[in-house]
Image (cartoon, rainbow, N blue to C red):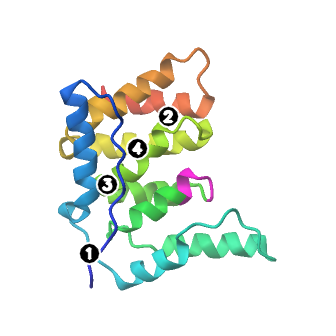
């Protein structure tokens, strides 16, 4: 099986002056480029499923909307969480609101470290609905709790500051606030 993949394009914010924060962003970029470092087994089926699922549909608008969604959920459920190339697909579908539920979240948590570069942009995207940002926060919190050492400064310099920013809002969104509180309690 091929281990070929296109790494996540990590956009390191401009103007970072704190060397620890810059190192955390460089760690995100390193993870994106080295997804096999944490194990995993390439699967031919994963390659086929990624080709079918990406790019994601702009909603389910075919003649059988419900069937389209059910078929997509079945395809997502067939992705191998032991193949880290699945992370981008799962994160995209979960955090863009195309699917929800425990299945995709659990799969991303199982994928662990290689999923982080795909989730961080959703956690930070202020244009995204808070409910969708909360999905990224929930999964990142669980991954960070299990793999803090592998993530290096990402937890301290990217994830925790974002969680604190959510909780410092006058009226945080219910879901985003709840997930931020739970994640912060585990990470502090």
Task: Identify the residue under disc 2.
Answer: 179
The residue that label 4 is drawn on is 120
Name the element at disc 2: helix
Q: What residue is shown at x 29% (from left), y 28% (from top)?
A: 16
Q: Is residue 100 left or right of residue 186?
A: right
Residue 38 visible: yes
Q: Is residue 92 above or below residue 137?
A: below
Q: Earlier in the sequence, mark 2 or mark 3?
A: 3
Distance between the alpha carbons at the discs numbered 1 and 2:
31 Å
Q: Is residue 30 left or right of residue 9?
A: left
The reply to whether dot 3 and dot 1 touch (C-beta < 8 Å) is no
Q: Secondary structure at mark 3?
A: loop
Q: Position of residue 79 (x, y in %)?
A: 44, 73
Identify the mark at residue 112; answer none if there is no mark. Answer: 3
Separation of residues labelled 4 and 1 (CA atoms) = 24 Å
Tell me where the magenta segment starts and ends, as one range: 93-98
Q: Residue at x 77, y 69 (%)?
A: 61
Q: Are marks 3 and 4 in contact (CB under 8 Å)?
A: no
């Amino acid at each position: 099986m091929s281990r070929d993949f296109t790494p996540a394009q990590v956009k390191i914010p401009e103007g970072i002056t704190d060397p620890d924060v810059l190192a955390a962003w460089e760690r995100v970029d390193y993870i994106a480029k080295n997804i096999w470092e944490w194990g995993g087994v390439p699967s031919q089926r994963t390659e086929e499923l990624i080709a079918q699922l990406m790019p994601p549909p702009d909603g389910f608008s075919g003649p059988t909307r419900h069937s389209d969604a059910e078929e997509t959920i079945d395809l997502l459920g067939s992705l191998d969480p032991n193949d880290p190339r699945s992370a981008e697909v799962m994160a995209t579908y979960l955090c863009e609101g195309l699917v929800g539920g425990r299945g995709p979240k659990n799969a991303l948590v199982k994928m662990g470290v290689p999923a982080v570069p795909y989730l961080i942009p959703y956690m930070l995207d202020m244009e995204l609905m808070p409910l969708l940002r909360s999905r990224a926060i929930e999964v990142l919190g669980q991954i960070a709790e299990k793999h803090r050492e592998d993530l290096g400064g990402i937890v301290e310099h990217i994830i925790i500051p974002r969680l604190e920013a959510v909780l410092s809002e006058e009226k945080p969104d219910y879901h985003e606030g709840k997930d931020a509180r739970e994640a912060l309690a585990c990470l502090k």
